[in-house]
Image: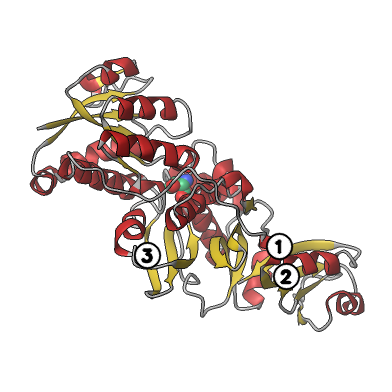
Amino acid sequence: MIKIALLGYGTIGSGVAEVLRINKDSITKRAGEEIEIKYVLDLRDFEQDPIQPKIVHQYDIIANDPEIAVVVEAMGGVEPAYTFVKQALLAGKSVATSNKALVAKHGAELLAIAKEKNINFLFEASVGGGIPIIRPLNSSLTADEVEEITGILNGTTNYMLSKMTFEGLEYDDVLKEAQARGYAEANPAADVEGQDACRKIAILTSLICGQQVDFEEIHTEGITRISATDIQYAKAMNRVIKLLAVSKKTKEGYSVLVCPMLLAPGHPLYSVNDVFNAIFVHGNVLGDAMFYGSGAGKLPTASAVAADIVDIVKNRDRNIMTAWSDQRLTLADYKQSKRRFFVRTTDSRDQVQNAFGAVELIQLPERFGEVGVLTGEMTEEEYEKRAAKLNEVLQMIRVV
Ligand code: HSE
């Protein structure tokens, strides 16, 4: 029997306990031995829950117990998760975590400690919820140079944009629903402002290039400025708006960007709706692949964490190598990437054509006094120069 400790009994932590309970027999068979939760660290008590006898309020009880071989971190946030996880690894305890903020910031260091101690630091649930993506990038696709990853990596915002598009619901109402379903972060600003997707694409880019990507350097825009009017325009163009996280290999290096984008029906991510996430991967020898599934929520995320626990048990005396050094990757300037732009402006058509040259006009009959246009392809730098010639830009959304 292997004894583990859970850090945090919130949505994910309680989900891990539930998965280990409901699939106990098959998990035991696959791991080769029984997995028992010995402690659950939380500030709260859970008197009505059978977990209560295992609740502890001090991390030292876990850190100092030699019987604990695996620590499962499901607290979220960088601190105190980082201190606890580092302490566990240094003490020879393997760690499974769902914490993207922790992995994006300290992944390289924690992986190095795990390697040195010949134990494991696994984080499948940190990107894409229940979708296997870390393991495929780290093993199945190691023969490839991954040239592009484009993902819908945040379930909350995808849920919100889908509801706004198909049910005409208001932003605040759909955010409340996403929170009630357990998709949103403790502070949902991390979802709607794109920071959650930013950390996830930083993790994926670090994995494919083997170096540390500083998420602070990724240009990130969320969905807070997307209005019902923008969604009407998107419909008029037969397109949808999605929050995309894009990482592309260019001659100048990886160009990484997180922002809402307009997608046409032929795009592989066009039909990814509700809380689902999807990750499109292009490898130089593989060609295209898509990973699709439940991107957030209690049990899907807990399923990925539990699978990491099983992998840790199966690899007790072996470090599963992950190539991610602490050498910092210099990102290419995203402003040099070429694309089309959708622009809403109160300027006249003549002024718009004077700024952008030939454009495709999109007119909503109910929007007097403004016009929507799709520009030709140009770099972001060029777009900014041309847009500066307009008197007023009400909205700009990039087109993919
Ligand atoms: N808040 C995150 C999301 C949870 O909505 O995708 C999963 O990482």
Contact (CB < 8 A) between labels 2 and 1? yes
Residue 146's tag is: none
Q: Tag 3: residue type?
A: Phe
What x and y, as percent, mark residue 75? 40, 32
- Mark 1: give few (<14), some (14-19) or many (20+) Cα within 10 Å: some
The colour scheme used to paint the residues is secondary structure
- Quarter location, residue 234: bottom right
Please tell me which of labels 2 and 1 falls first in the chain: 1
Residue 291's tag is: 3
Residue 335's tag is: 1
What x and y, as percent, mark residue 197? 52, 51
Front-most of residues 111 and 170: 111
Please tell me which of labels 3 and 1 falls first in the chain: 3
In percent of the image, x 87 and y 64: which residue is there?
388
Residue 379's tag is: 2
Left or right: where does residue 391 sit relative to residue 210?
right
Q: Quadrant of the N terminus?
A: top left
Q: Tag 1: residue type?
A: Lys
Residue 66 appears in the picture as rendered: yes
- Mark 3: give few (<14), some (14-19) or many (20+) Cα within 10 Å: some
Q: Quadrant of the C terminus?
A: bottom right
- Quarter location, residue 302: top left
Find out if the beta carbon at label 3 lies less than 8 Å from the nearest ligand 1 atom.
no
Find out if the beta carbon at label 2 lies less than 8 Å from the nearest ligand 1 atom.
no
In percent of the image, x 71 and y 71: which residue is there?
341
